[in-house]
Image (tube, rainbow, N blue to C red):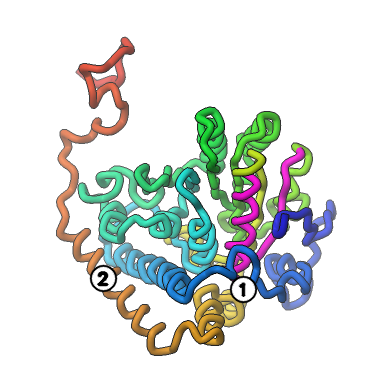
Amino acid sequence: MEGLHHDTMVEKNNEPPKEVPGSTDQEQIVETASVADSEKDFSSTSMNASLSPEDKIELFNQMVRIRRFEERSLRAYQQGHIGGFLHLYIGQEAVAVGAVSVMSDNDHVITAYRDHGHALAVGMDMDECMAELFGKRTGCSKGKGGSMHFFAPDKNYWGGHGIVGGQTPLGLGMAYALKYKGLKGSCLCFMGDGATNQGPFYESLNLASLWNLPVVYVIENNGYSMGTAEARHSAGEPLARRGEPFDVDWSVSYGHDLYEVRQTMGDAIRQAHEASKPSVLEIITYRYRGHSVADPDQTYRSKEEIEEYKKSKDPINLFKSKLIDEGVLSEESAKSIDVKAKEEADASAEFANASPYPEPSELMDDVYWETDNPSERTSGGTMFFESV
C-alpha cells in the first residue's frame, strides 16, 4: 500500500552518537532521511486529490485553532490560572489534524499526556478543554483530569494518559473490541518517541500481531523524549522498525506536511479496516516548547535549532503557503482565520475563569461506575478506604 512501507531512514549504529559540527541529534536524524521522500508532493495522492477547497481551509483552520489555544493556555499558566503540568502541542499540529481527518465512524483515538491537539481535532470545543486546564467543573473531565486527561467518549476520544506507554495496551484492547464486535474500524494509539522503550508497548505489539488486531501505533517523534535526544535514549533507528520482529508493518514519514500525514494515516487505516492488520507509523515532528512548561528547555537543544525548524518546517506556515499557491487561500482570509482563532481562545479562557470549581463532595464521583449507580452494583467489598 502506498505510504506503508519498510523505510530505513537511519542506519543502525551501536556506537555512541557521533557529533557533527553545527548539527544536533534531531537534525542529523532528519537530514539522514531520504531526500526523495522529503520532497515528494502528496497533494494529489489518493487521500488528498478529492479534498475540496472548503475541506482544505477547514484543515488549515483546525491547525490554527490548536496553535492559538495552546498559546493562550500557556499564558493562563503563567498567570497562575493553571496548576500541575501543561504539555503543549505547538509545532505538531499537522499530525493530529491530518490523522483525525481520515478517520471514519468506527475509528477511535487514544493518546498520551500531550493530548490537547488531538482533543480539538476530534471536535472538542475550546471551552470544555480550557475549563479542564483551569480545574473547573465545566471541564471535559469535570476539573479532575487537568492537562493530561482530556476525554470525549462521544467523539471516540479516550484520552489523555499520564503514564508513559500506558495507553498502548488500552489501544490494543479497543482494537480487540472492534474486531470482537465485527466492526470495520481501528484504534489510533498515539505515543511519543520515549514510550517506544516501555515494556507494555512490546507486549501490545506481540498480541496485535498474534491476533491480527486493527490498531495503528503512531509514534509522534519530536526528537527528545522528555529532554534527551533520540540518539542518546534509543538504540536502533528508525523507531518504527521495532514492529518488524513481530511481523507488524511499519513506515516513517514527516509530520510537517499535512498532506503526507493524511496519506500515511489513510493507508494504515485502510489496512486495519480491510485486513484487520496492525501497523506502526513513525511521524517525524517537532515541539517548539519544552516537554512541559516546567521544563526550561535550555540545556538540550539550541534556540537556533528551534528557529530553523520554525522557519523551514512549520506545519501551519507550510500548509498556508501550499493553499495560497493552489489558489484556495489568500493572505487576507488566512489572517481572518487566525484572528477568529485567537478570539475563540481568549473567550475560552474567560469561560474557564468564570466557571465554578468542583464541590468537595464530588471527589469520589466518576471513579467507579458501580459507586455512581449503586442500585445496579453487582460486586462486593469496599471501593474506597476512608479514615474513621
Q: Would residue 53 be counted in the magenta stretch?
A: no
- Rendering coords of residue 237 (x, y %): 76, 54
In this picture, residue 315 sits left or right of residue 359: right
Q: Is residue 267 magenta?
A: yes
Sort mark 2 into few (<14), some (14-19) or many (20+) by Cα contacts within 10 Å: many
Residue drawn 33% across the image and 69% down it: 72
Which element is circle 1 on?
Answer: loop
Q: Is residue 320 visible?
A: yes
Count of marks overlaid on the render? 2
Reply above or below: 202 against 384. Answer: below
The magenta segment is 247-272
What residue lies at 42% left-to-right and 70% top-to-bottom?
58
Instruction: Choose top left, top right, bottom left or bottom right for residue 336.
Output: bottom left
The residue mark sitting in front, 2 or 1, is 1
Q: Which mark is residue 346?
A: 2
Q: Residues within 10 Å of mark 1 (few under 14, many from 20)?
A: some
Picture quarter containing residue 260?
A: bottom right
Quick check: 384 above or below 359?
Answer: above
SS category of the residue bearing label 2? helix
Which quarter shows the N terminus? bottom right
Q: Which residue is mark 1?
A: 43
